[in-house]
Image: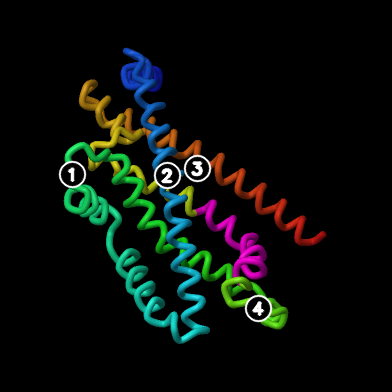
Amino acid sequence: MGILNWFAEAGAKFSAAFLENDRYIAYLKGFGTTLYVSFFAVLVGVVIGLVLAVVKYMAVRKKSFRPLGWIANIYITIIRGTPVYVQMMIIYYIIFNVRGFPAFLSGIICFGINSSAYVAEIIRAGIEAVDRGQAEAGRSLGLSEMQTMKSIIMPQAVKNILPALGNEFIVLIKETAIIGGIAVLDVTKAAMNVGAKTYDYLTPLLIAAFMYLVVVILLTKLLSMFERRLAKSDRR
């Protein structure tokens, strides 16, 4: 009887937290915001990270790029060495403290900047994994450093970079759980709002955690399939 009562009570809590008053819609909208912010943050991170990675790569080879290389290293050190929550608060409440500026856009910028420091190292590692003879071959054909990078190095580095970028997207999905701190209605914030109405925070948070878990597992499986296809194409 004790177990049956426990299941009955758990079912009632789930119904109150997820089904009553169509509360599942809030979770779905919240998770849509989570994916939206994560996707565009990765795009911002890739753009900035690519610039940083190329600057660091060129700084090793050309003296004219060394000052930019120092700046890139300082940027990466600061971003990787400070908590993303603190960065979010600074960006939202200080840098973009403008009436009417969308909070979710602050979140995209924050997580994009944070991601760029990690993406820069991913791209740099992918570039350095390409055989140095490829760069020498490009130079022997009369291509400049940047032309060699664009036409020879980067196309080969992409295969090394893409799986790691997929992992970065998965990490970002989980990291954006703190975006509710700047009043963005993501899935975690939606769960907290439901908890405030039902006086039961545990069940809504467990529902939100389960949604994260399902999506992360699915994306991890898709990423594994993608990596296997890349490996097969390499063998061919």
Which circle marks residue 135 in the picture? 4
Q: Nearer the viewer, residue 227 or 105?
A: 105
The residue singled out by tag 3 in the image is 216
Q: Earlier in the sequence, mark 1 or mark 4?
A: 1
Is residue 75 toward the left or the right of residue 218 in the image? left
For the residue carrying disc 4, how many other residues have a C-alpha within 10 Å: few (<14), some (14-19), or many (20+)?
A: some
- The residue range painted magenta reads 149-167
State if disc 1 and disc 2 touch (CB < 8 Å): no
Q: Quadrant of residue 104?
A: top left
Q: Nearer the viewer, residue 113 or 26?
A: 113
The residue singled out by tag 1 in the image is 98
Structural distance between the alpha carbons of marks 3 and 4? 37 Å
Of the two numbered discs 2 and 4 in the rendering, the one whose residue sits closer to the viewer: 4
Q: Amino acid at mark 2?
A: Ser
Q: How is the image coloured?
A: rainbow
Numbered disc 1: secondary structure: loop
Q: Earlier in the sequence, mark 2 or mark 3?
A: 2
Numbered disc 3: secondary structure: helix
Which circle marks residue 168 in the picture? none
Which circle marks residue 38 in the picture? 2
Looking at the image, which residue is at 46% across and 39% down?
213
Q: Quadrant of residue 163?
A: bottom right
Structural distance between the alpha carbons of marks 2 and 1? 23 Å
Q: Amino acid at mark 4?
A: Ala
